[in-house]
Each structure stands twice: as C-alpha cells, then as structure tokens.
C-alpha cells in the first residue's frame, strides 16, 4: 500500500510541475523527473497533481462565489439603508415645511395681538410709548 502524501511532498510536486512547464518539458517527462525525486511512480505523481489542482481550483471558485455572495448581500443592505434614509429625509423635509408654515402663522397671530394691544393701550394713555415692529 502506498504511503500517504506529506504537505512537503505536495508542495514540491506543485513546484516541480511549474518548473517543468517553464522549462518546456512535456507532461510525461515532467512526471518522470518528479517521480525520481519523490520516490513515487509517475502515475501516482500525476494523479496527486490532478487532485491538488482540482481541489485548489474548486476552493478558489467556492471562495470567489462566497465573496460574490458576501458583496451582493452587503450591496442589498446598503441599498435598503439608502432607501430608508431617503424616506426619512423626505419625511423630515415635509415636517420642516409644515413647521415653517405653523411658525409663520403664529408670527402673524403674535403681530396681530401686539397691534391689538397697542390700540387698546393708546386711547387710555397717550403718553405710553411702545416700540413698533
């Protein structure tokens, strides 16, 4: 029975394949040389390399998908937050308009009351002086 692969052997296998490819060797020669260095058959080295590269690429795809889902959910939360903030701003703007109208109304009422008070005071005591608006 074959011995299990160590992390160091996996690392060396991946590194040797990269070096062999850069050197322009074909697949058979690459795995023949790797098998000599690692003391395993060329077929075992090839199968392990295929396993490692498929695991890495599927993990990378899963990581990318997970990252995409994370950003999509974050974008959705931010869009909802923007929508809520827009609604709150609209409500505050409406309330501000309403309060300004009410303030204007009460200012007018106060001026009317002030003028009425002036008219009431004048006939009784013409020497009383009040500041006019």
Image (cartoon, rainbow, N blue to C red):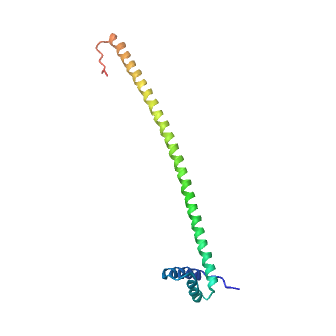
Task: Kindly give the residue lying farthest to the top in the view shown.
Answer: 123
Q: Determine the residue positioned at 60% across, 78% down.
A: 49
Q: Along the line of sight, which residue is nearer the eye, 32 or 59?
A: 32
Q: Is residue 43 left or right of residue 76?
A: right
Which quarter of the picture shows residue 71?
bottom right
Instruction: Give the vertical position of 6 relative to 56 (above or below).
Output: below
Indicate the position of residue 81 as horizontal and vertical percent values.
Answer: 52, 47
Indicate the position of residue 36 as horizontal and vertical percent values.
Answer: 58, 89
Which quarter of the picture shows residue 109?
top left
Instruction: Give the vertical position of 120 relative to 34 (above or below).
Output: above
Q: Along the line of sight, which residue is nearer the eye, 116 or 126?
A: 116
Which quarter of the picture shows residue 124?
top left
Q: Determine the residue positioned at 29% across, 18% down.
A: 129
Which image quadrant: the N terminus?
bottom right
Instruction: Give the vertical position of 111 relative to 125 (above or below).
Output: below
Q: Determine the residue positioned at 35% across, 13% down.
A: 119
Which image quadrant: the C terminus?
top left
Q: Is residue 119 left or right of residue 98?
A: left
Indicate the position of residue 86 as horizontal and vertical percent values.
Answer: 49, 41
Task: Kindly give the residue lying farthest to the right in the view shown.
Answer: 1
Q: Along the line of sight, which residue is nearer the eye, 33 or 48?
A: 33
Indicate the position of residue 131 as horizontal and vertical percent values.
Answer: 30, 21
Instruction: Give the vertical position of 97 relative to 27 (above or below).
Output: above
Q: How many marks?
A: 0
């Amino acid at each position: 029975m074959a011995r299990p692969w160590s992390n160091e052997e996996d690392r060396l296998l991946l590194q040797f394949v990269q070096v062999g490819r850069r050197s322009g060797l074909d697949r058979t020669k690459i795995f023949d040389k790797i098998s000599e260095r690692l003391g395993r058959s060329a077929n075992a080295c090839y199968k392990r390399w295929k396993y490692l590269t498929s695991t890495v690429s599927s993990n990378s795809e899963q990581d990318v998908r997970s990252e995409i889902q994370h950003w999509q959910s974050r974008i959705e939360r931010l869009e909802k937050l923007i929508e809520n903030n827009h609604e709150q701003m609209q409500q505050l703007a409406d309330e501000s308009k309403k309060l300004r109208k009410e303030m204007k109304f009460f200012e007018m009422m106060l001026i009317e009351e002030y003028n009425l008070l002036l008219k009431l005071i004048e006939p009784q005591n013409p020497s009383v002086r009040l500041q006019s608006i």
